[in-house]
């Protein structure tokens, strides 16, 4: 399970180059940018400032971000297995952990760039709102700021990384495109809908009390992202925030999901 | 007309390989996929500098044997020992180069880029520039893999297998889909590699080239090794490897072209 920096770097670089040279990646990014532009304009937030744009985008981002991450990750190991390259990697010095880490880091860089570009129209819309107060680089209560939008995109990236790691786990475990698609669809359904519904049921039945609700909400990646956006972007600029505990719980959830995905990919990518 | 008919049930000439020069030793391995046994009690020792051709009908267990030789797959029973030290570990050996039956490196990369990548992963190895020349792709070093012909991709695969300068090179049908010139080229490269020290094990259906170029033929049929020795010994003095092989496949009662023994 050792990690070799040289191997990880080489593998990560290969992933970046692969995606950068694939037209579909750019089309996907452009598609996200178009959707973000449309939401910023249609939602009206673009006429009011950065924070209203964030409010308009936060819910759609819960779907758009994992969609993009899944698209970048769900076939990586599957394609390498089919092409025979995984078999070649398996007998070479890099460990499974190095291969998975390299692939993850490379795809993570690409995903971060794609999300930055994809959400750029929202930033432009906020900037074009023209409110002089919005230009303040401040995070104190009541102030709109470009920093809030940047924070939102950073949180979206963190959320995207957890989705990417889970997509890589699916990619490592499956043996066909159909299984990969079914895997990410099923996973998306469970994470985006199932956990929320389960939590809702637990609240209704009294299993989860109001005092533990903020932490319980952090269980699913999308709820953790939602919680982070609310506590560190929206509430910072409006009302009092939910506290450090909630932020830590939400960040820990996203990190944990990322870890689960990576470990899953390491275990299943090939037998040792 | 050849006078030699089929070889006996199982011929095993005395192996030329001594324990000291062994690069890989296979000890009584059996391998199954579920209830299907594809290799049964196979033992084999391959020494440094040998060019060994594994031949046999489709589904006879050649590819499985090669995968087990790489260490990437563990046998159901028995051991595969890499190295000269007698190390009993069956873990993946870092000095093995492998060309799977189907290898299609990423289309987005050039020939040299692909070899650079694998050279980096191999830690120590040959200069990718030298490998490009060695496998005959020096005319197209910057051509994207997606634009290479099937034959050129096989040559690139051969380059990937040898760029790490491994002790053992395992090639699963490296000449599949290649014309005669390319086939000869691949065997010449394999011969050169073996002459430089590493052992080269390849599966091939091109028996006439095998007869000319290989040091040893391992004939696998029905999951068992039926013959292991120099190509000239397979058919006897008056019979070519091709004719003896054809006789065996056509008349041998134990021939299993259908995929292993149950």
Image (cartoon, rainbow, N blue to C red):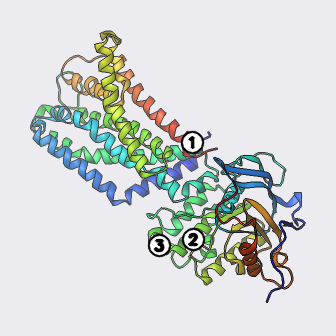
Identify the subunit bearing mark 1: A
Identify the subunit bearing mark 2: B
Q: Which residue corresponds to the image point at 88% horizontal and 68% vertical from the top-left?
A: B13
Q: Which residue corresponds to the image point at 53% horizontal and 70% vertical from the top-left?
A: B153
Decide: is B45 above or below A41.
Answer: below
Decide: is B252 above or below A135.
Answer: below
Residue B221 in the image: state x and y as whole percent.
73, 64
**Are there few (<14), some (14-19), or many (20+) residues within 10 Å of tag 2?**
many
In this view of the protein, which residue sits in the foreground, A234 or A188?
A: A188
Secondary structure, mark 2, is helix
Residue tagged 3: B143
Q: Tell me the mark number nearer the camera, choosing from 1 and 2.
A: 2
Q: How many marks?
A: 3
Q: Are marks 3 and 2 in contact (CB under 8 Å)?
A: no
Residue tagged 1: A97
Q: Tell me the mark number nearer the camera, choosing from 3 and 2.
A: 2
In this view of the protein, which residue sits in the foreground, A252 or A147?
A: A252
> Which one is earlier in the sequence, the residue at label 3 or at label 2?
3
Residue B52 in the image: state x and y as whole percent.
76, 68
Q: Are marks 1 and 2 on the same chain?
A: no
How far apart are the two marked residues, 3 and 2, measured between alpha carbons?
Answer: 14 Å
Secondary structure, mark 1, is helix
Q: Is residue A139 left or right of residue B119?
A: left
How far apart are the two marked residues, 1 and 3, measured between alpha carbons?
Answer: 31 Å
Image quarter (top left, top right, bottom left or bottom right) of the N terminus of chain A: top right
Q: Which of the numbered marks, if any, corresponds to residue B61?
A: none
Q: Are marks 3 and 2 on the same chain?
A: yes
Residue tagged 2: B154
């Amino acid at each position: 399970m050792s990690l070799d920096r040289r191997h990880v770097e080489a593998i990560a670089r290969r992933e970046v180059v692969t995606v950068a040279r694939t037209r579909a990646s750019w089309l996907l990014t452009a598609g996200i940018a178009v959707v973000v532009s449309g939401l910023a304009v249609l939602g009206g937030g673009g006429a009011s400032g950065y924070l209203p744009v964030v409010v308009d985008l936060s819910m759609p981002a819960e779907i758009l971000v994992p969609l993009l991450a899944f698209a970048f990750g769900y076939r990586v190991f599957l394609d390498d297995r089919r092409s025979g390259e995984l078999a070649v990697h398996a007998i070479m010095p890099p460990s499974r952990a190095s291969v998975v880490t390299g692939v993850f880091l490379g795809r993570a860089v690409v995903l971060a760039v794609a999300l930055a570009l994809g959400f750029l129209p929202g930033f432009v819309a906020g900037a074009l709102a023209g409110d002089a107060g919005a230009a303040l680089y401040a995070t104190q209560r009541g102030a709109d700021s470009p920093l809030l939008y940047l924070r939102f995109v950073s949180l979206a990236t963190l959320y995207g990384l957890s989705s990417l790691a889970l997509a890589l786990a699916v990619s490592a475990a499956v043996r066909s495109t159909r299984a990969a698609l079914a895997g990410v669809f099923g996973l998306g359904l469970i994470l985006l809908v199932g956990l929320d519904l389960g939590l809702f049921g637990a609240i209704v039945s009294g299993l989860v009390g109001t005092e533990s609700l903020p932490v319980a909400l952090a269980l699913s990646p999308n709820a953790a992202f939602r919680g982070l956006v609310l506590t560190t972007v929206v509430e910072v600029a409006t009302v009092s925030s939910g506290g450090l505990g909630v932020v830590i719980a939400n960040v820990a959830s996203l990190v944990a999901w990322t870890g689960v995905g990576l470990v899953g990919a390491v275990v299943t990518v090939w037998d040792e | 007309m050849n006078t030699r008919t089929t070889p006996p049930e199982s011929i095993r000439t005395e192996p030329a390989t001594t324990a000291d020069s062994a690069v890989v030793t296979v000890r009584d391995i059996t391998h199954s996929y579920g209830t299907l046994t594809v290799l049964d009690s196979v033992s084999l020792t391959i020494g440094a500098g040998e060019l060994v051709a594994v031949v046999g009908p489709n589904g006879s267990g050649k590819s499985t044997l090669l995968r087990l030789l790489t260490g990437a797959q563990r046998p159901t029973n028995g051991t595969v020992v890499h190295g000269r030290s007698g190390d009993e570990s069956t873990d993946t050996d870092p000095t093995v180069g492998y060309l799977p039956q189907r290898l299609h490196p990423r289309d987005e990369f050039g020939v040299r880029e692909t070899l650079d990548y694998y050279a980096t992963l191999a830690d120590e190895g040959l200069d990718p520039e030298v490998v490009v020349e060695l496998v005959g792709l020096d005319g197209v070093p910057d051509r994207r893999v997606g634009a290479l012909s099937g034959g050129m991709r096989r040559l690139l695969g051969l380059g990937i297998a040898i760029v790490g300068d491994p002790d053992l090179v395992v090639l699963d049908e490296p000449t599949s889909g290649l014309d005669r010139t390319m086939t000869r080229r691949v065997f010449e490269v394999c011969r050169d590699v073996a002459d430089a020290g590493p052992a080269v094990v390849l599966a091939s259906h091109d028996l006439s080239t095998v007869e000319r170029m290989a040091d040893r033929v391992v004939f696998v049929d029905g999951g068992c090794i039926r013959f292991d020795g120099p190509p000239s010994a397979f058919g006897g003095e008056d019979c070519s490897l091709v004719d003896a092989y054809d006789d065996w496949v056509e008349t041998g009662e134990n021939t299993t072209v259908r995929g292993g023994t149950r």
